[in-house]
Amino acid sequence: VVQLRARLVSEAIAILQGGAPLFIWVQFLALLSAAAFNLLLVWLLVVRDKPRLRARGLLPRITGFAGTFFGVSILHLPVAPLNLTWQIIAALLVMGGGAGSAIVLAKLGKSFSIMPEARTLVTSGPYAHARHPLYTVELLTIIGTAIQFQQPWAALLALMVVALIYARTVFEEEVLVEAYPEYATYRARVKRFIPGVI
């Protein structure tokens, strides 16, 4: 994180001094977006509502915590030397995932949760099209972030995050079905991540 902060500061200085090439602009925006996304997750912990029901056992809690914060470990790796094309792809994924997260979180509001918990059942907006749209856009951010850091380690960490996210959905849905019996009907008609696909 110290390395990332130093990189962001040096690139911001280069941009402010003028004459920074397009690559520096794109890399700065992508890395800043990745850091901002992780800070957003921390902030949401502070403002969320009290849960109505929580998952039982230690495994759902470990999965929820690890699934949320394991992606941050990618930021501890050295930044990868990318060409402009890959840097633009990474930036688009991270910024697209960040924008998507903002849209989904606006609908989810204080129902945001890290652990498998039920606060309020949300089935409208993005949730009318996918049961876990926040995880879908989070995956875009994780992929875009992983592209920017040392391989193959960043890719392996990203794959672990994907597995943890899937496990989180399983535990969360168990809690939601118990707290809200109507969730079973919703689950039967709405796909998990991508409308009409999966």
Image (tube, rainbow, N blue to C red):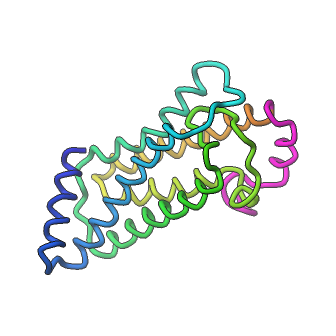
Total number of numbered labels?
Answer: 0
Q: Position of residue 63 (x, y in %)?
A: 54, 31
Specify the quadrant that holds the C terminus: bottom right
Residue that sits furthest to the left in the current view: 17
24 magenta-colored: no
Specify the quadrant that holds the N terminus: top left
Q: Tell me where residue 53 sits by quadrant.
A: top right
Q: Position of residue 184 (x, y in %)?
A: 85, 41
- Horizontal placement of 189 versus 57: left or right? right
Q: Position of residue 192 (x, y in %)?
A: 71, 51
Q: Does residue 61 sit above or below 134 in this rendering?
A: above
Residue at screen point 75% across, 36% down: 176
Q: Does residue 89 sit above or below 106 in this rendering?
A: below
- Horizontal placement of 72 versus 112: left or right? left
Q: Does residue 11 sit above or below 120 in this rendering?
A: below
Q: Position of residue 196 (x, y in %)?
A: 75, 63
Residue at screen point 33% across, 46% down: 153
Residue at screen point 67% across, 26% down: 54
Residue that sits furthest to the top in the current view: 57
Query: Which residues, given as a range, are shown in magenta?
Result: 178-198
Q: Tell me where residue 127 sits by quadrant.
A: bottom right
Residue at screen point 19% across, 78% down: 21
